[in-house]
Image (spheres, grey):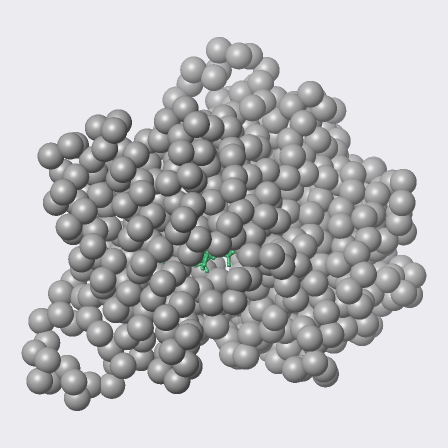
């Protein structure tokens, strides 16, 4: 597999990359820290990756999106899959008070992810094949007082991906929306762990399966589909009274 | 958003979690502890003042995967430094077999990458779910101790991060004394960030295994003497409840890496990992059920058998069942591993086994093995020449503690020692006898590092 990853230092993305490397794949990593990207690139080479390239940049630099896709395609002589994995959870209370922070959070989680998916689509449209896999979140399924900035960004991203999938389907391009529940990663390091937390490794397996089977939307682990089904079915008149 | 991509994230200070957490326990599930778990994310992270000013009086201890049985990997009411995310390979030299890896990688992850390339770890324990850091800090041994020595014998270098922020690369060339203190150093000399290990060449993942029943302890020693120069791996399982003529009967396993290429064609049976679903109720754990299990295990093995098996069932038979420790119920269990002088049929091991068999306690899993003569590299390494016995003992409170104390007296008397990686109960006095080298270790201990075990025995 020739895999381009945005947000390659994310714990979930690293788990995916390791598996692809183990199978002898080629990878191109984009993330914002040169030093940590280097550590990951070295690791992937030992695990069997045929080739690993990297670019260090903040993923909100939208002028460069198509350049990055082109660089990756040139380095690997093609791209099979783009994985968009970056994101920030943010502190809801602080976001409510500080509109700069709120703007940045929506910019990272929604705008940059959506526009990177679009830039990837432009490349795949010429190739007439490819997969765009994007990590959303179960938090995007319903707005809750405890994290509606993050939730709104992820929810907006999901609607964007529905439209993109609809547009690209006739060209045979696959768009996968990945909706993990709680995952034990640096993003959730400050939360108390319980049985609902999945490992990045099991989520990575789910992502690769979703790519191989050309699924549209996957909940990971799959029991979240049931939980979110219930949460979505609660009438708003009741939901607004709940402390969630 | 402030553009953060300039400052290297990999060097950010280690930050301490604000949440007290019971999620990290040891394999014996005793004692139960609570700690602030602080994950390390990158090997370049700093141990700065800011890591420490929130909790100036608390101590630190690295935590691998908690595959130690007792409290040497625990730091009750203090801080554990999780190494799970230090899981990157750094370099594998396919010519020389030198492997450089971060310390939080498990042996399982390492084996999955190196075996297909014709390499094996020089020493492996009875489970592959331990980390490289844990393997070094306990200077672990395996079924090949008689030829290969301990894991530490194959560590060429490592990097140590101390709470004062200093970093040291330790090897045979530089900081050699720090290397010797850190191998078998129980995590108390600092955080091992990465290590360089010399691998062993193999041609395929298969092992040719022979299984032999021995009807008493004398016969075990015969098999052991006969096998140790012909077989790279040897170990005995023992029925610790049989007495009289049958005292110390068991099953002897010995094996070598298969040297033929064709074996690569053999198919691995798809392993189904099962999970022990809940803590077994205590009434199931009695002498009767253990007696039945031990007798059955002995008799279901043929008196002699040769076969070819994959390395996983050969080295890690228990890994096929997740959480098998729940078999021992909520109160957990003790593991007791001692080494005593060899001395053939006069070995003190006879007395120890007899005492245990008559004590009224039982053990599902008793393992016996002769150690070789190689000198362990660590100041506080456990293995030394002699014979080592491992017992799994359900926690029945005072009664269990009393009998293990009696075993301790015997081990102390013959100049043996008990393995800290498996211990949750040895006394200060016993520890002093087992490890007279401790004063030499003291100057390498990080003043801000400690463990439940260390506070108990010193
Ligand atoms: C089924 C089973 C079979 C076993 N068989 C054997 C055997 O055959 N031979 C044998 O010797 N042992 C055996 N053991 C014990 C096991 O190998 C050791 O206890 C091992 O050290 C556990 O490794 P861990 O990564 O889980 O570390 P932990 O148990 O979490 O920690 C062990 C020690 O290592 C330290 N440590 C961990 N990581 C680091 C680091 N990065 N830097 C510094 N210190 C660190 C900790 O502070 C602690 O002192 C067995 C255990 C089980 C459960
Ligand atoms: N963990 C969960 O419980 C959970 C649940 C549902 C969905 N998700 C989603 O899963 C994805 C992966 O997250 P994770 O759990 O693996 O957490 P993570 O390890 O913290 O990964 C987040 C990644 O996003 C990167 N990033 C953030 N802002 C960036 C920016 N402006 N430019 C470049 N990179 C940026 C971070 O880069 P640095 O390493 O350089 O900081 C980091 O690699 C995210 O989209 C997240 O929203 C996570």
Q: Of residues B243 and B117, which is closer to you in this image?
A: B117
Q: Residue at x 80, y 68 (%)?
A: B164
Q: In which quadrant will I find the C terminus of chain B?
A: bottom right
Residue A130 vertical position relative to residue B297 in the rendered view, above or below: above
Quick one: which residue is furthest to the right in this view? B440
Percent x, y for residue B141?
A: 69, 44
Choose top left, top right, bottom left or bottom right for residue A226.
bottom left
Q: Of residues B407 and B433, which is closer to you in this image?
A: B433
Residue A211 visible somewhere in the drawing: no
Percent x, y for residue A75?
A: 47, 28
Locate residue A126 relative to residue A35 in the image: left or right: left
Q: Residue at x 73, y 74 (%)?
A: B49
Residue A50 visible somewhere in the drawing: yes
Locate residue B360 relative to residue A83 in the image: left or right: right
Q: Of residues A202 and B392, which is closer to you in this image?
A: A202
Residue A162 vertical position relative to residue B298 in the rendered view, above or below: below
Number of numbered markers: 0
Q: Of residues A143 and A96, which is closer to you in this image?
A: A96
Q: Residue at x 71, y 54 (%)?
A: B192
Q: Residue at x 7, y 78 (%)?
A: A235
Quick one: which residue is furthest to the front in this view? A63
Percent x, y for residue A30?
A: 47, 45
Locate residue A13 relative to residue B416 in the image: left or right: left
Locate ligand 2 by image quadrant: bottom left
Percent x, y for residue B303?
A: 51, 29
Residue B116 vertical position relative to residue B8 in the rendered view, above or below: above
């Amino acid at each position: 597999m020739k895999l381009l990853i945005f947000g390659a230092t994310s714990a979930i993305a690293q788990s995916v990359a390791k598996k692809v490397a183990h199978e002898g794949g080629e990878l191109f990593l984009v993330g914002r820290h040169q030093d940590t990207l280097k550590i990951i690139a070295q690791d992937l080479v030992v695990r069997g990756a045929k080739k690993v390239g990297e670019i260090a940049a903040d993923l909100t630099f939208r002028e460069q999106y198509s350049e990055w896709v082109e660089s990756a395609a040139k380095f690997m002589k093609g791209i099979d899959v783009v994985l968009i994995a970056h994101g920030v959870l943010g502190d809801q209370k602080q976001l409510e008070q500080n509109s700069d922070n709120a703007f940045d959070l929506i910019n990272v989680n929604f705008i940059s992810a959506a526009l990177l998916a679009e830039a990837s689509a432009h490349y795949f449209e010429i190739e007439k094949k490819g997969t765009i896999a994007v990590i959303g979140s179960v938090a995007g399924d319903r707005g809750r007082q405890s994290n509606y900035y993050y939730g709104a960004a992820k929810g907006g991203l999901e609607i964007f991906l529905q439209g993109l999938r609809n547009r690209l389907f006739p060209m045979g391009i696959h768009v996968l929306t990945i909706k993990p529940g709680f995952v034990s990663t640096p993003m959730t390091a400050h939360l108390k762990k319980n049985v609902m937390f999945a490992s990045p490794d099991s989520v990575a397996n789910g992502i690769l399966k979703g790519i191989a089977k050309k699924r549209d939307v996957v909940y990971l682990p799959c029991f979240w589909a049931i939980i979110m089904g219930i949460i979505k079915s609660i009438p708003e008149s009741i939901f607004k009274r709940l402390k969630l | 958003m402030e553009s953060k991509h300039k400052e290297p994230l990999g060097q950010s200070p280690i930050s301490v979690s604000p949440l007290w957490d019971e999620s990290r326990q040891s394999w014996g599930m005793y004692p139960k502890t609570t700690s602030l778990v602080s994950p390390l994310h990158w090997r370049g992270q700093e141990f700065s003042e800011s890591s420490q000013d929130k909790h100036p009086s608390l101590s630190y201890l690295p935590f691998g995967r908690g595959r130690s049985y007792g409290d040497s990997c625990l730091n009750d009411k203090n801080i554990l430094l999780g190494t799970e995310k230090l899981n990157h390979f750094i370099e594998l030299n396919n010519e020389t077999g030198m492997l450089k890896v971060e310390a939080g990688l498990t042996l399982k992850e390492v084996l999955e990458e190196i075996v297909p390339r014709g390499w094996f770890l020089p020493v492996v324990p009875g489970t592959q779910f331990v980390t490289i850091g844990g393997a070094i800090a306990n200077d672990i041994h395996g079924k090949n101790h008689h030829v290969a020595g301990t894991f530490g014998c194959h560590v060429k270098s490592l990097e140590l991060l101390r709470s004062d922020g200093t970093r040291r690369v330790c090897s045979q060339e530089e900081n050699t004394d720090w290397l010797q203190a850190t191998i078998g150093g129980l995590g108390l000399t600092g955080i091992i960030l990465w290590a360089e290990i010399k691998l062993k060449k193999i041609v395929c993942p298969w092992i040719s295994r022979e299984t032999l029943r021995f009807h008493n302890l004398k016969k075990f020693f015969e098999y052991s003497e006969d096998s140790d120069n012909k077989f790279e791996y040897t170990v005995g399982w023992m029925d610790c409840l049989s007495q009289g003529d049958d005292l110390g009967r068991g099953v002897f396993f010995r094996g070598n890496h298969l040297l033929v290429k064709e074996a690569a064609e053999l198919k691995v049976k798809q392993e189904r990992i099962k999970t022990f679903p809940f803590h077994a109720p205590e009434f199931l754990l009695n002498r009767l059920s253990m007696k039945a299990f031990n007798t059955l295990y002995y008799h279901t093995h043929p008196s002699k058998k040769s076969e070819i098996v994959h390395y996983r069932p050969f080295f890690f038979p228990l890994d096929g069942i997740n959480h098998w420790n729940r078999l021992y119920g909520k109160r957990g269990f003790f593991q007791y591993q001692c080494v005593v002088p060899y001395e053939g049929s006069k070995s003190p091991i006879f007395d120890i086994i007899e005492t245990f068999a008559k004590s009224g306690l039982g053990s599902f899993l008793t393992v016996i093995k002769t150690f070789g003569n190689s000198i362990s590299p660590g100041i506080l390494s456990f293995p030394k020449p002699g014979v080592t016995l491992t017992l799994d003992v359900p926690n029945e409170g005072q009664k269990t503690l009393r009998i293990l104390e009696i075993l301790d007296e015997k081990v102390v008397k013959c100049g043996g020692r008990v393995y800290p990686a498996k211990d949750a109960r040895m006394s200060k006095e016993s520890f002093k006898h087992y490890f007279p080298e401790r004063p030499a270790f003291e100057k390498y201990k990080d003043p801000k590092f400690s463990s439940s075990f260390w506070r108990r025995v010193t």
